[in-house]
Amino acid sequence: MKLKKKIVLLLPTLVLTTLTVACFNEVKDSNIKKSSDANSNYAVINELNNENFNLRQQIDDLLTNYKSNEELLPQLIEDQSSIKKEWSLLKDTIEKKTFIIQTNENKRQELFAQLPRLYPNEQENKLIAQLKIKINLEAENYTSEKAKINEIFKQIIKLNETLIADEQAQERTKQDYKRSNENLKENESRIAKLTSEQITIRSEVKKIIKKIESNYEKLVLLKAKSKLNITEVKDEIDKTIENPDHPAEPNPPVDPSPNPEPSNPDTENGDNNQPTPPPVFPNFPTYDAAAHSYPSYVSNFTKLNPNDIYSEIYDLTFSFKYSWNEPSANGNNVIGDISQGTAWLIDYHQYANSNRYKLFMATNMHVLDYFGNTLSEELLTKLNYKDPLNGSVHSFAIGKTQNRPSNFDAIPNNSYDRYKQVKGGSTVYKSSTSGAMSNPEIIFAGIDFMDKSIYDLAKVNEYKEKYKELINSDEASAKTKKINYLNTLDYIPYYTDFGIFAFDIDLDNTSDQTLREWITNAKNALDQYILRNKQRNLPNHKTSDLPFFTVDYMSKSSNLLANNSYYQVYNEFALYNAKDVYIGGYPRNTNRETYWMQNNPTERNDENLTTYFRSPNNKNAFSYATNDTEAKVVNNNVQVYTKVWNRPLLSFYGNNYNIKFSSLYFGASGSVVYNEFGQIIGIYNGVQASTAFGDLLKNATFAPLIQAGDFVVIGENTNQKMYAYNLIDATNKDLYPKQTKSYRENLRQIYKTGFTDGTKTTALFIKGF
């Protein structure tokens, strides 16, 4: 994920399976805005959908807090027991040590009492002086008395040492006891606070659920009034997530299920007293088992070893960052590392009779957010790839770990610090400023790649006004340029989060052995991937196809293939979900340190854990469950997007797929996504905003590279569609009649006469693009 970019993932659509046709009689007209025409009703429907959308976000946030608390409470309770044991032991130790010290002190006093009085007192001195008594002590008696005295002194000295050590130990124990007592009180306070928070969260969620139920009843009535088929409406509501009214949303944290509340909790502070666990959480609908299972024909396909998949991903993948020339009145200001993400080798051209290559790298468009203006003016105009601020890329760098990871085994969640070296250590970079790599060019951008005829031009002014609001706080000069550009537009183009850039490198002209090794390994990994896809029986793909999906999961699950003559053959063996997905990239932590990280921690295969809401246990859960997507176009909910190339765009076109066990931190944006059969199925582009570095058990998303079917847009204009597209190769206009640009089509535009060696072949297009 690109740094600074936090994409909030959404909660799965709550489905009210108990709602029946009877609700039509129970909902009063006074509960909704009255309207005599369907268009007004649709406006209310959208308003209710948006309200439900926001309510689900509130539930997501509440459940995230609930799960966090629920994970913390058992540990706090366990800590409380440990602290109490320590506290009791320290208390006993202090009492025992006090007795020992007192006993030794008594012994010492007894020893002092045994010593002969060696010096006369004042009265005796006077008497001696008066009587002139001479004390004569025989040598034998003197030696004997001296030995006794020495022995007593030795015992006293030993006791002194013991007493000093005991008193010092006693002081330390008292300090430990004091700290333990403070910890005990603090832990009790935290448990009480968390328990109270859990009760409050459950209460809030119940209130929100009631509000959503009420909204759904209103939606049913409104759809009936809008002359929609009543049975169809009921079927919509009764479904789980196959065809929701609102955009499908990712699963929130696990549905907490605390222990039952004790019938007679001990309210005293006795040794056996434990904090009262919160009562059972509201009973939400269970998960859809069919969404987490494969069809029987999956047995025709062979899964790859996960370590082999990660190894291939590692070789293809680089950390990627670049600097930007920002135009100013005094010339260009270079902004270093303005953007950072992850990129991977998707294609390459080897120049004739040389060790020189043109490398094509894929990443997210939100990583390439300042990557406009890298082509000639003619091409920028023809492809509509202009950044109105007229900035340009200054330099870029690619990076990998200092060492190749020792292995690609799974590690426990949130444990990355312990495995840094095993996973390759910190990241080192090779910059284009060294001269080894040429200036980069944008080859394909997920911007304005569909025909103008698909847009609702009636909304253009609305989008323009929204864009002006969003850039209102921009610097004056930049704002003026953006507004001037805005005024030239007669439509706002769609955006999808995928782009490809290219640069040249001559391995014979660089002495950097590490860079040579990186590029060679990446090229070999891509060759291996392409060959495997031509030789193996794989789902959603034929061996004669390009080595990517020919039909996507959503088109299959939405029954868009069976009636299409071209796709009928694929329909027989296409899958509609994915048990496992594999991602590896280069997230950057809060200390600005970048490391290699892969998804699927060890908890992913733990059958005793259920991390995700409305999902089976982790071992049986599908990373991508059937229909777990979000589609803003289909749901008539596109947003004006301002973060790419300083111009307005509509976000986003196509489906975003929601996935589990894959929340790589910011900086991993642009990572390639594989399924368990070793196929590239998309590009990683979103992570839950609350995710911390190393936490892989939050929600995440990826964008597909293809959509085989046309999806009907929900709303008043039922003639509107989200049309089929293929970001890699849309040259077959029978399949993609509304698409105007793709990677292959742009190669034809940019390299009309071929590359500088006169050829038009690449690893993907061996017969020429």
Image (cartoon, rainbow, N blue to C red):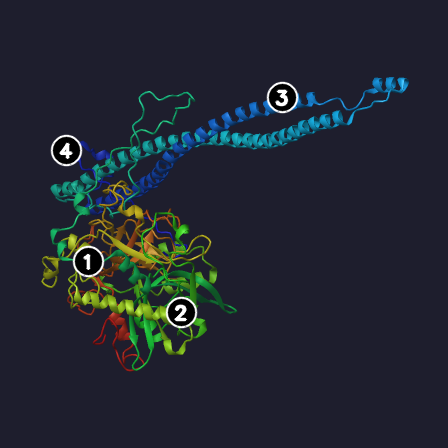
Q: Give the residue type at disc 2.
A: Thr
Tag 4 residue = 22
Marks 3 and 2: which is nearer the front? 3
Horizontal arrangement in the rendering, residue 619 relative to residue 400 (left or right): left
First in residue order: circle 2 vs circle 4: 4
Tag 1 residue = 552
Horizontal arrangement in the rendering, residue 404 relative to residue 767 (left or right): right
Identify the secondary structure beneath mark 1: loop
Q: Give the residue type at disc 3.
A: Asn
Q: Give the residue type at disc 1.
A: Asp
Marks 2 and 4: which is nearer the front? 2
Tag 3 residue = 106
Report, in whole angstroms, how far the alpha carbon at label 3 lies from the one at label 1: 88 Å
Query: Pointer 2: residues within 10 angstroms few (<14), some, or many (20+)?
Result: few
First in residue order: circle 3 vs circle 1: 3
Query: Pointer 1: residues within 10 angstroms few (<14), some, or many (20+)?
Result: many
| 532 up-or-down from 50: above or below | below
Identify the secondary structure beneath mark 3: helix
Identify the secondary structure beneath mark 4: loop
Closer-to-camera residue (45/184): 184
Report, in whole angstroms, how far the alpha carbon at label 3 lies from the one at label 4: 90 Å
Q: Give the residue type at disc 4.
A: Ala
Closer-to-camera residue (301/455): 301
Identify the secondary structure beneath mark 2: helix
